[in-house]
Image (cartoon, grey):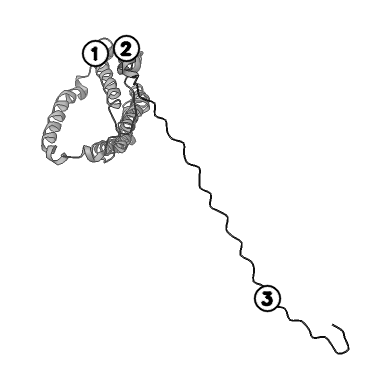
Amino acid sequence: MNIDTALFYVFAAVLLFASFRVITARSPVYAALFLVLAFFNAACIWMLLRAEFLAIVLVLVYVGAVMVLFLFVVMMLDVGSEALREGFWTHFPVAAIVGVVIALEMAAVLIPGTRLTDAPVLSPAAMKLGNTKLLGIEVYTNYLYPLQIAAVLLLVAIIAAIALTLRKRKDSKYQNPSDQVRVRAVDRMRVVKMKAVVEPPAPPPVVAPPPTPVAAPTTPTATAAPAAGEKK
């Protein structure tokens, strides 16, 4: 076993673990972060396969842009994990059957493309073009219609995400522009004729009399008797 094979098994194991945690994480934010980890490991595997352009595109486009949008959508929707997990085990058998069918279909489509014996031999002129240019020629000639369909699906997903963020929430205030445009002056203001009511003047405040000062008690003072020979 060489170093490339060992790195492939390491990246593949981390990729499988991150993929499993994406669907089992309790928090949607943690699930998105595990998906970022899965994308990084897939990019590393593509680097081992010498598909440098696909690896860079996966890191820049999916990790740098799409996953940021996923995180923003998750945070703006404020989806409760408890509400998502209601009835999980009830629908698990049907979901497992559908997942197995999808996995078998993908295997039936992808496994024949991994046979190296059936791979066409490139001409020396095509090998000089490089992986990036050959990939562009293949995508925009033989796979142009699937590329356009994928672009339309992504556009629908973006519009759906924006529409979901505009739903009514109890803790948000918003205005309806259509109702503001259709409003009339009669609906905004109504003149009501009422009789004038004159309120009587308020009575003057009652001032309490000041408290009467209390005289301090006097204490008798003793006088000395005159001495003999002194006149009074």
Please tell me in which quadrant of the rendered image residue 157 appears.
top left
Residue sitting nearer the eye, 143 or 1: 143
Image vertical order of residue 215 relative to residue 168, above or below? below
Q: How far is mark 3 from mark 2, CA to CA?
A: 130 Å
**Circle 2 is placed at which residue position?**
126
Label 1 close to label 3 by CB (< 8 Å)? no
- Neighbor class of circle 2 (other Cα within 10 Å; few <14, some 14-19, many 20+) is few
Q: How far is mark 1 from mark 2, CA to CA?
A: 19 Å
Q: Earlier in the sequence, mark 3 or mark 2?
A: 2
Residue 219, which numbered label? Answer: 3
Query: In the rendered image, which quarter contains the N terminus?
Result: top left
- Neighbor class of circle 1 (other Cα within 10 Å; few <14, some 14-19, many 20+) is few
Residue at the spot x=19%, y=19% of the render? Answer: 118
Residue sitting nearer the eye, 215 or 151: 215
**Circle 1 is placed at which residue position?**
143
Q: Earlier in the sequence, mark 1 or mark 2?
A: 2
Residue 142 locus on image (x, y percent):
23, 11
Residue sitting nearer the eye, 2 or 115: 115
Residue at the spot x=76%, y=81% of the render? Answer: 223
Amino acid at the residue labelled 2: Ala
Front of the two marks 1 and 3: 3
Residue 78 locus on image (x, y percent):
30, 34
Q: Earlier in the sequence, mark 1 or mark 3?
A: 1
Label 3 close to label 2 by CB (< 8 Å)? no
Query: In the rendered image, which quarter contains the C terminus?
Result: bottom right
Question: Helix, strand, or loop for circle 1?
Answer: loop
- Left or right for 229, reference 113: right
